[in-house]
Image (cartoon, rainbow, N blue to C red):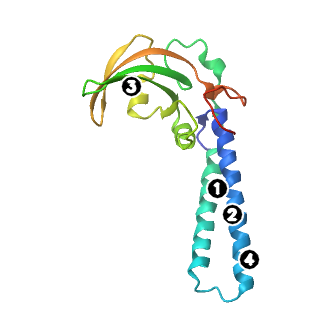
């Protein structure tokens, strides 16, 4: 039995979008390969070889993405409404003070590794998605508004304060808020 993966519904939609794009690329490469075959001897042609390698890479990508969709459970907004501590699916506003004394306010969404991996590739998200297993994810999960604490980062200790958290736009079923720019 496969382990259950928790993820956002929007992550599933993004995985399907990526699979569809890979399938289109695969079909295009197949048409290219057929054209090479019609043109004659292609046994030692480096372009044909690269085409074959790319088709194999795409097959692996499609299989990996398809496997992510097996045994999934969605993180639902209703599960978070009564939460008084930060959990998966919350958008968190933090005050961050760096080791050099600089500080900033930042917003992050706490997600699973799959959410972070799949949606983290997108450039059109205004809010960064962090994995619950990342150092920052581990540091903020279970915290409350107003809590101040330090956590270790590659550049030294970060001093953090939780300013606010709320249900993330990523938990909206299929209609997305202004935080999500671009198409599905």
Q: CA distance from mark 3 to mark 1?
A: 33 Å
The quadrant where residue 173 appears: top right
Which badge, 1 or 4, comes first in the chain's sequence? 4
Which of the two discs, 1 and 4, sits closer to the camera?
Answer: 4
The residue lying at 48 percent from left, 33 percent from top is 130
The number of numbered badges drawn on the structure is 4
Label 2: few (<14), some or many (≥20) within 10 Å? many
Q: CA distance from mark 2 to mark 4?
A: 12 Å
The residue located at (73%, 77%) in the rendering is 34
Can residue 171 be seen by looking at this rendering? Answer: yes
Residue at the spot 71% in from the left edge and 82% down from the top edge: 37
Instruction: Determine contact: label 3, label 1, CB under 8 Å.
Output: no
Residue 5 location, x and y as percent?
Answer: 59, 37
CB atoms at circles 1 and 2 under 8 Å apart?
Answer: yes
**Contact flag, marks 4 and 3 (Cβ < 8 Å):** no
What secondary structure is marked by label 4?
helix
Relative depth, front residue between 178 and 82: 178
Badge 1 crowding class, 10 Å Cα cut-off, few under 14, some 14 to 19, many 20 or more, is some
Report the disc number at residue 62: 1
Q: Which mark is residue 26?
A: 2
Which is more toward the observer, 78 or 73? Answer: 78
Q: Residues within 10 Å of mark 4 (few under 14, many from 20)?
A: few
- In the rendered image, the residue lying farthest to the bottom is 41
The CA span between labels 1 and 2 is 10 Å
State left or right for residue 94 relative to residue 34.
left
Q: Which residue is mark 3?
A: 139
């Amino acid at each position: 039995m496969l382990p259950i993966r928790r993820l956002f519904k929007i992550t599933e939609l993004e995985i399907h979008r990526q699979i569809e794009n890979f399938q289109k690329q695969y079909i295009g490469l197949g048409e290219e390969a057929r054209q090479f075959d019609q043109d004659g001897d292609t046994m030692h042609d480096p372009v044909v070889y690269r085409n074959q390698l790319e088709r194999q890479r795409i097959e692996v990508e499609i299989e990996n993405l398809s496997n992510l969709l097996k045994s999934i459970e969605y993180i639902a907004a209703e599960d978070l409404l009564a939460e008084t501590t930060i959990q998966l699916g919350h958008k968190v506003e933090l005050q961050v003070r760096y080791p050099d004394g600089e500080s900033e306010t930042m917003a992050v969404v706490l997600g699973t590794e799959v959410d972070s991996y799949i949606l983290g590739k997108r450039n059109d998200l205004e809010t960064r998605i962090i994995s619950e297993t990342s150092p920052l994810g581990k540091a903020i999960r279970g915290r409350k508004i107003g809590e101040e604490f330090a956590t270790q980062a590659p550049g030294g200790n970060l001093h953090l304060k939780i300013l606010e958290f709320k249900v993330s736009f990523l938990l909206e079923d299929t209609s997305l808020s202004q935080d999500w720019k671009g198409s599905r």
